[in-house]
Amino acid sequence: MNKIIIANFKMNKTSTETKDYLVRLLSRFDNAGDDRLMLCLPYTSLAIGKFMLEGSKIELCAQNMSEEDEGRCTGEISGRMLKDAGVEYVIIGHSERRKKFKEDSRIINKKIKSALKNGLGVILCVGESLADRNTLKTLDVLKEQIEDALKGLYENELEKIIIAYEPVWAISSGKTPTSKEVEKAFKGIRKIIAADFSAKAGEEIAIVYGGSIDVKNARQFADVKGGNGLLVGGASLDAATLMQIVAVV
Ligand code: PEP
């Protein structure tokens, strides 16, 4: 499989700033390359993103969605709305949302089902806290998060799921696990999927690593056995840096 690079802007950039960014990115991006580049923009940048990415193979993605399709949910954005805005994939279960917005496994499962129903792919974020890591609970946490999130899904729906392994303590901290630790987590994730769906599903599920990726460590983590790419937060906010990461993986 070719590499997948997912950029998560988080709550950064106005639509004007996104436009300037995309001008720079598109001037450097090789549309004929084999790797996938997915940009998870803030909601307010989706319209300019759709306009500017027309004709490019860069995928327009979002960072969150409501578990409901429509109705009395003031301030929320549904999967149906994202689909209409041209979005292809949406991040669900990011640790910042699990923590700050108290998103639990029931809501994450509902969001995933709603995304798939509306024709969106899902970037499912999972990962252990520092306390879990220090007490050797990483694989137990991954099992619980993945099984809760994917409960009730059909095997063929996994084609539209990318699992992002993001140790919570590594996100935007400048700290990273070792390649061996990431390899072990990837192997564990494939085992969970194989046990819950099939051996084939375990082999084929797309998995990326996320957490303090920069130009210097991108290649190391993109090369970890069993992985398919990277999720990049902070370092993706500069178009030239993101393109350097794409170039080294
Ligand atoms: C993220 O946003 O999920 C992330 C991994 O951020 P950062 O690359 O800044 O650690």
Image (spheres, rainbow, N blue to C red):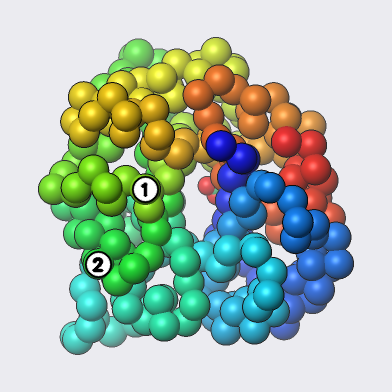
Residue 248, x across and y down, in percent: 79, 37
Residue 2, x across and y down, in percent: 61, 40
Secondary structure of the residue carrying numbered label 1: helix
Q: Nearer the viewer, residue 178 or 154?
A: 154
Q: Is residue 129 above or below residue 87?
A: above
Q: Residue at x 21, y 73 (%)?
A: 68
Secondary structure of the residue carrying numbered label 2: helix
Instruction: Looking at this view, name the residue that lies furthest to the left.
Output: 152
Q: Residue at x 59, y 45 (%)?
A: 4
Task: Give the left or right position of residue 138, taking residue 25 as reference.
Answer: left
Residue 41, x across and y down, in percent: 57, 68
Is residue 239 visible from the viewing direction of this image? no
Q: Do the residues labelled 1 and 2 touch (CB within 8 Å)?
A: no
Other residues around mark 2 within 10 Å, as few (<14) / some (14–19) / many (≥20): few
Question: Tag 1: residue type?
Answer: Glu
Q: Name the residue under label 1.
A: 159
Dot 1 or dot 2: first in sequence order is 2
In which quadrant will I find the C terminus? Answer: top right
Q: Residue at x 68, y 75 (%)?
A: 55
In which quadrant will I find the N terminus? Answer: top right
Task: Give the left or right position of residue 69, taking residue 23 as reference.
Answer: left
Indicate which disc residue 200 carries.
none
The image quarter containing residue 92 is bottom left
Question: Tag 2: residue type?
Answer: Lys
Q: Nearer the viewer, residue 200 or 17?
A: 200
Is residue 106 visible from the viewing direction of this image? yes
Q: In this view, does 141 lie above or below 72?
A: above
Q: Mark 2 points at which residue?
A: 117
Q: Residue at x 69, y 69 (%)?
A: 56
Q: How many marks?
A: 2
User: How far apart are the two marked residues, 1 and 2, measured between alpha carbons?
Assistant: 14 Å
